Image (cartoon, helix red, strand yellow):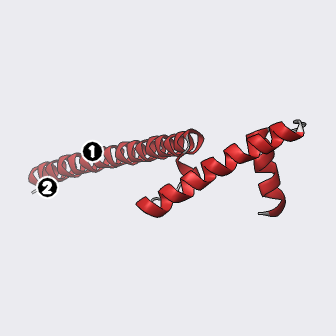
Amino acid sequence: MGEAQHHWTNKQSGIELLLVDAILSAQEIDKRIAEEVKTALSTGILANKQTELFHRTSRKTQRHFATAHKARETNELQTLSEHLQNQIEEEKMKRKESSQRQRELQGQQG
């Protein structure tokens, strides 16, 4: 905690407050924290800072990026697969035509 707790408290209460205002502000913060701890102990559910809007949005963006990246890779692989399949079909046709031509020439020769 140490210095990090001091910074957090300043963010919650403000700085350069009059003594009475600082005490009242700290009291409110303490009450709120005590209520959070009480709730966590009674429900067994701890507050999770990773569920704030920033973190949820960040993870959502990462998921969308990963999905788009996978879709792009899949599309590239599909295109390559189709290209190779077309080449295979062309080569089969050429081989078939070559065999037919070879039989024709052998028929003319023999």
Between residues 86 and 26, which one lies in front from this camera angle? 26
**Disc 2 marks which residue?**
106
Contact? badges 2 and 1 (CB < 8 Å) = no
Vertical comparison of 14 with 31: above or below: above
- Residue at the extreme front: 20
> Which secondary structure, mark 2?
helix
Q: Distance between the residues labelled 2 and 1?
A: 24 Å
Percent x, y for residue 41?
48, 63
| Residue at 62 percent of width and 52 percent of height | 33
Vertical comparison of 42 with 108: above or below: below
Query: For this view, does 18 lie left or right of residue 38?
Result: right
Between residues 88 and 68, which one lies in front from this camera angle? 68
Between residues 62 and 1, which one lies in front from this camera angle? 1
**Kind of residue at disc 2:** Gln
Query: For this view, does 1 lie left or right of residue 98?
Result: right
Q: Is residue 45 visible?
A: yes
Percent x, y for residue 72?
45, 42
**Disc 1 marks which residue?**
90
Q: Can residue 48 be seen in this view?
A: no
Whichever of callouts 2 and 1 sits on the residue coming sooner in the sequence is 1
